[in-house]
């Protein structure tokens, strides 16, 4: 699958659709001279992560097929038969959202953590945070959010 339009929108930057999202963004940040921790860096990282998720799963939260595909991607089988059932099942699945995107890009299976606590420890240790405010507004992402802090 093609990377988000955001990566392709920068002149003199050749996106690699198979690279990990965090690595690809870091490469873009270096090319654009965005300093880690700066407002420009954080703003563009947030945009990038959101657009990349939407590139892979879209924004049509009324599509049962997309909910079922997302459920399957995090290892929920058989696929729930309604959006409500998908949301319920996904709310119990503990996955790192950044890893979920990376696995889609790489064509590999995402790791499911046995508990929210294990997910929290991993996310903090690896510094793999998806923008919380953006995730709260997105129906797909909202069910995957967990208390990390």
Image: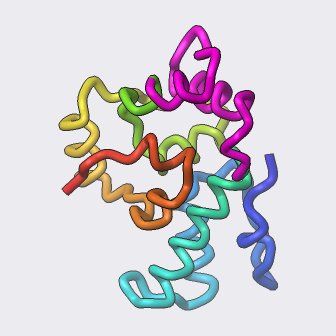
Q: Is residue 143 left or right of residue 53?
A: left
Say if 13 sits above or below 85 in the image: below
Q: Give whichever of 137, 42 is nearer the camera.
A: 137
**Residue 120 counted in the magenta span:** no
> Residue at horizontal 45%, vertical 80%?
42
Please report the bounds of the magenta region as a residue range: 59-88
Classify residue 36 by image quadrant: bottom left
Q: Residue at x 38, y 55 (%)?
A: 128
Quarter of the figure with the C terminus: bottom left
Residue at point 72% right, 72% down?
6
- Viewer-proximal residue, 116 or 87? 87
Compare residues 102 and 76 and report the one nearer the observer: 76
Residue 59 against residue 82 in the figure, above or below:
below
Instruction: Name which quarter of the figure residue 27 lies in.
Output: bottom right
- Against 90, is 144 above or below? below
Q: As displayed, is residue 144 above or below residue 55? A: above
State which quarter of the image contains the N terminus.
top right
Q: How is the image coloured?
A: rainbow
Please give left or right for residue 13 compared with residue 145 in the image. Answer: right
Q: Count every numbered label the image shows and give the total.
A: 0
Query: Residue 4, percent across and down?
Result: 73, 62
**Residue 86 versus residue 70: which sits nearer the camera?**
86
Q: Position of residue 13 (x, y in %)?
A: 76, 77
Q: Quadrant of residue 133?
A: bottom left
Residue 138 rendering spot, x and y as whole percentages: 55, 55
Q: Is residue 64 magenta?
A: yes
């Amino acid at each position: 699958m093609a990377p988000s339009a955001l990566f392709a929108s920068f002149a003199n930057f050749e996106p690699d659709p198979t690279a990990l999202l965090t690595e690809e963004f870091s490469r873009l940040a270096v090319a654009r001279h965005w300093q880690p921790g700066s407002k420009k860096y954080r703003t563009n990282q947030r945009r990038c992560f959101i657009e990349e998720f939407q590139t892979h799963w879209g924004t049509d939260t009324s599509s049962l097929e997309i909910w079922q595909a997302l459920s399957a991607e995090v290892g929920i089988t058989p696929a729930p038969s309604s959006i409500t059932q998908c949301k319920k099942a996904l709310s119990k699945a503990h996955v790192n959202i950044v890893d979920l995107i990376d696995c889609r890009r790489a064509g590999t299976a995402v790791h499911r953590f046995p508990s929210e606590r294990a997910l929290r420890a991993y996310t903090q240790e690896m510094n793999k945070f998806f923008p919380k405010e953006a995730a709260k507004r997105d129906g797909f992402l909202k069910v995957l959010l967990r208390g990390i802090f």
